[in-house]
């Protein structure tokens, strides 16, 4: 089951915002996935953690830039604190 996170985000005035109906749908989908037992296995959880690490590595420049723009955080401080 692939989650449709893109459906949750819409655009308003050039900014991405959460859509209520999309959020409700996403929560329903996540609950169904949990109830199915899919999330119980060690292998599934280990794979999810590996994918989080991969995501963070791929998005690192964007994360650093966002923290700099939003909080004026220098990248070295972000590495240490975040």
Image: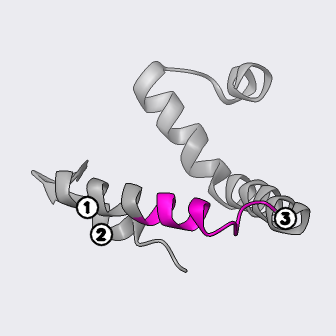
Q: Where is residue 25 shown, x and y percent of the image?
A: 30, 63
What residue is shown with label 1? 22
Extent of the magenta region? 29-40
What residue is shown with label 2? 7
Residue at position x 43%, y 31% in the image: 69
- The quadrant the N terminus occupies is bottom right
Q: Nearer the viewer, mark 3 or mark 1?
A: 3
Question: Crowding near pointer 2: few (<14 within 10 Å), some, many (20+)?
Answer: some
Q: Where is residue 8 shown, x and y percent of the image?
A: 30, 61
Residue at position x 84%, y 64% in the image: 41
Between 60 and 42, which is closer to the camera in this rendering? Answer: 42
Question: Crowding near pointer 1: few (<14 within 10 Å), some, many (20+)?
Answer: some
N-term-proximal mark, 3 vs 2: 2
- Kindly check if marks 2 and 1 are in contact, taking CB atoms under 8 A apart as contact: yes
- In the shown orientation, is residue 34 left or right of residue 31? right
Q: Is residue 37 magenta?
A: yes
Q: Is residue 24 magenta?
A: no
N-term-proximal mark, 2 vs 1: 2
Q: Where is residue 37 shown, x and y percent of the image?
A: 69, 66
Residue at position x 70%, y 26% in the image: 82
Give the number of the disc on residue 73. Answer: none
- In the shown orientation, is residue 64 left or right of residue 43? left
- Kindly check if marks 3 and 1 are in contact, taking CB atoms under 8 A apart as contact: no
């Amino acid at each position: 089951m692939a989650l449709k996170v893109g459906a949750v985000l819409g655009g308003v005035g050039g900014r991405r915002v959460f859509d209520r109906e999309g959020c409700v749908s996403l929560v329903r989908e996540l609950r169904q996935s949990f109830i199915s037992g899919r999330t119980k296995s060690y292998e599934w959880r280990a794979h999810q953690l590996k994918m989080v690490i991969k995501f963070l590595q791929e998005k690192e420049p964007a994360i650093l830039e966002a923290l700099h723009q939003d909080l004026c955080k220098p990248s070295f401080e972000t590495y240490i604190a975040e």
